[in-house]
Image: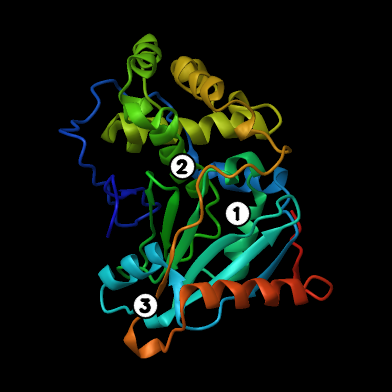
Amino acid sequence: MRSVLSPRGWAALAAICLSLQNTGVHALLEKPIMDPAVPFDHMDTNLYDHLKSTPATYEAWEYGWLPARCQAVAESWENKSPYDMEVYNVLYEDCDTPWVMCRHKDAPLTLEKMIDNFGRLPVRLRNLVRVQLAFPARGEGSLLAYAFSDLGDIVFTGDMYPYIRFWFHEIGHIRDRNVNASAGDYSASDAWLTEYDKDDYICDAYAQNNHAENFAQEVVVAAYDKIVPGGIASLVPNYEDIYNQFVNVQEVMGDELCPGGTCNRLFEDDHIVCMGPDAGCVTERDHIAARDARLKEREEEVRICEFGH
C-alpha cells in the first residue's frame, strides 16, 4: 500500500487490532485509564439518534477504472483483486462534488450502509475524507478500520455499519495528520502534549496504545460531547479526568464536529487508473468525459438514498 504514513487501525468487540506507524517508537502511554473508562461501545446508538443522514444520489463508474488507492489496497489484500472492485460517485445534497466509494464485491459493508454512515457525519467533517474503501474481513468475526491520513482515505473491513464511532476515530487520524501537515502529527506536538499533561488519566485501554490513538479516541469523545444532548457528562460521570484533552480537540477542530456548514474538501480527488490489462480501459481523459456526460444526463432522474434516524 502506498502511504506517507502507515495505516492506523482500531478494532472493536473481539476484533483483530492493527496499529502500524512509521514515525518512531511508540510506547504505551504511562497514564492510568480513568475508572470507569469511557464506554465507547455505548456511544453508537446515541450518535445514530442525533445524526440524520444526508440524502444522496449515487452512480457506478464504468467497469475498468478505479482510484489509484483502491487499486493499491486491492492488490495488497489477501486473495483479492482490483477486478472485483465496484466504484461509485456519491453526491450528497449538501455538496456539489461527489465523494468516491470503492467496495469489493464480497464486502459485508454494503454501499447503502456506507452512504448512510458517511452522510450522518457533519459535512465539515466529511470534508477531510477523500476515498472510502470496503473489504471483506481478514478473519472471521473481525472488524478493522484504518486511515491513510496523509490523503484522507479510509479502509473498512467487515460489517462496520453499527459502529459509527469508527468513522469519527479514523477521521480523527486524518485531522491529527493535517492540523499542520508540514509539522507532522498534532498528537506529537508540544501543544497537544501540554494539554495531555494537564489530565491525570486517559479515556480507555485503546487510547493507551500511543498518542495518535489517544488523540483519535478523544475526537470521538469530543464529537459525542458536541452532538448528543447532555454531552459526555451524561455518559461518564468522571469526564473531568480527560477534560483538557477532549476540550483541546474541540478547540482544534472547531465546527468540524458540529452538524451544518458547507462543503470545502481538503484533498483533491485521487488520480484514476485502470484495474489491469484485462479491463480493456480507454484513456483516462475519455473516461472522465464519459462520466461527466452521464452525470449530466442523470441530473433529473437519479436514485435517491434517504435514511431515517
Q: Quadrant of the N terminus?
A: bottom left
Q: For the residue marked with disc 3, what is the amino acid?
A: Pro
> Is residue 118 placed above or below 149 in the rendered structure?
below
Residue that lies at the very extreme toward the right in this rendered image: 300
Distance, label 1 to label 2, CA atoms, is: 13 Å
Q: Nearer the viewer, residue 178 or 113?
A: 178
Identify residue for label 1.
118
Residue at 28% across / 57% down in the picture?
Answer: 2
Q: Which mark is residue 82?
A: 3
Identify residue for label 2.
169
Q: Earlier in the sequence, mark 1 or mark 3?
A: 3
Element at label 2: helix
Residue at 29% across / 57% down in the picture?
Answer: 16
Crowd around label 2: few <14 · some 14–19 · many ≥20 (10 Å): many
In the image, taking residue 104 as reference, residue 289 lies left or right, namely right
Q: Nearer the viewer, residue 154 or 32?
A: 154
Q: Earlier in the sequence, mark 2 or mark 3?
A: 3
Distance, label 1 to label 3, CA atoms, is: 23 Å
Q: Nearer the viewer, residue 122 or 19?
A: 122
Residue at 34% across / 71% down in the picture?
Answer: 74
Q: Nearer the viewer, residue 121 or 37?
A: 121
Element at label 1: helix
